[in-house]
Image (cartoon, rainbow, N blue to C red):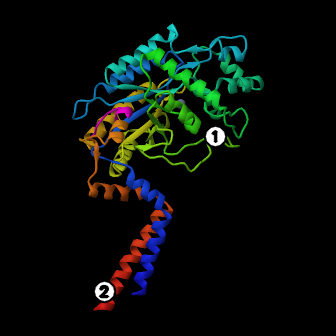
Amino acid sequence: MYGMYLVLLLWGVALFAIRRDLSLSWTEPCLRHPVMVFEGDDWGYGPLEQIDALREIAAELGVHRDLTGRHPVMTLGVILAGPGAGATADEALGVGRVALDDVRLKPVRDAMTQGVGAGVFDLQLHGMEHYHPEVLARVAQVDPQIRAWIAGAPFVATEQLPSPLQSRWTDASALPSRALDEADIRARVAGEVAMFRQCFGTLPEVVVPPTFVWNESVERAWAAQGLAVLVTPGERYEMRGADGLPVDTGICLHNGQRCTSGLLAMVRNDYFEPLRGHRADHGLESLATKWAQRRPLLLETHRSNFVGAKAQRTESVRAIGDLVSAALRSQPELRFLTVAELARHYAQGGDLIDRRPWTRTMALLHRLDRPGRRRKIFGGLAVLTAASAVAALVTAT
Ligand SMILES: [Zn+2]
């Protein structure tokens, strides 16, 4: 009998230890159908070969449809400007900057908007530049490699910059990085939203922070400019550490969470980078896991799979098509939609949201089931519970 009390006590302690995760996992809404979205970052300013890449991706996505007739969607995280010609780095990054409204980049804009019209793309704000211009100019003064990169402008690939410098919303000119001035943030956010509108005639609804480094001030500035949805990796990183990597804050985010800034969080929960060897089987496995958790599968992918020296465009486009075909075969109820639409279902409790207690309970168990120490502890507790139940029965008879 005392054994059973001890087991109950252990359960109490274990559940108390994960109480935060438990409550977040329970509150996060459950989906009624599996959902898969490709989240393609870094499109816009850069090499003109992306025009063909965008057209080929759009053509491949246009071949497939879900039960409701919708095509699979690749959201495009748009970068609106980059270095142009200039005598100095300051000039190339400042007054000489080339923005996406430049006539030379019109075919890029056209490829994007035609894909939106065809129902295979949706445009999301990624940032004016994929760096902070003043920070980069400061580094260029002392780093010949950055100067060489800028000298290759216009239409250079920001993917080639060192990762910490690709973070637009922290000053990584020296590591660990430092927070930016609030007024600077507000002005730059206003500028990028205005440029998005100038290029596409609409305001952006969804924002994807470059390299997923941003803070509360940036979030509030986006909200003030009318943004509604924030794409996250499930955590907010605010700076780069001494090693150049994003620093953990412990600020976790889940799908449909209303941030204090007012933005609604969505979570990217896997990658699909054909260049890194991801193929249909990887995507399928992930889709099954996320569906068991009643979460959408938001697959992060990048322009670098399709454009640039290392890109394998044909293979990468084919990998996307293969995954979509295989996903429709394995999950016939699969739905395709944009992240903005998905976020609206979360915000308004649309018909994609399943509130049945049994669904929520099963999803909760799958959400809490993580490989590693936790699985071992709860697995051990389950065995202990069964053993003490058997012992109690034997003693009773
Ligand atoms: Zn990016």
Vertically, is 314 above or below 270? above
Element type at mark 2:
helix
- At a point 28% along the width and 54% down the height, the residue shown is 359
Q: Determine the CA span between mark 2 and mark 1.
A: 56 Å
Image coordinates for residue 352, horizontal then vertical, percent: 28, 42
**Residue 239: mark:** 1
Q: In this image, 88 relative to 252: left or right? A: right
Reply above or below: 10 against 267.
below
Return the x and y of residue 396 as percentages of the image width and height.
30, 91
Q: Which residue is mark 2?
A: 393
Residue drawn at x 29%, y 35% is 325
Which quadrant of the figure has residue 364? bottom left
Q: Amino acid at mark 1?
A: Met
| Residue 10 versus residue 164 in the image, above or below | below
Q: Residue at x 68, y 33 (%)?
A: 171
* The residue at label 2 has a CB less than 8 Å from ligand 1: no
Asked whether 6 or 89 is in front, the reply is 6
**Can you see residue 314?**
yes
User: With 67 as the anchor, is 295 left or right in this view?
Assistant: right
Provide the residue span drawn in magenta. 334-341
Q: Amino acid at mark 2?
A: Leu
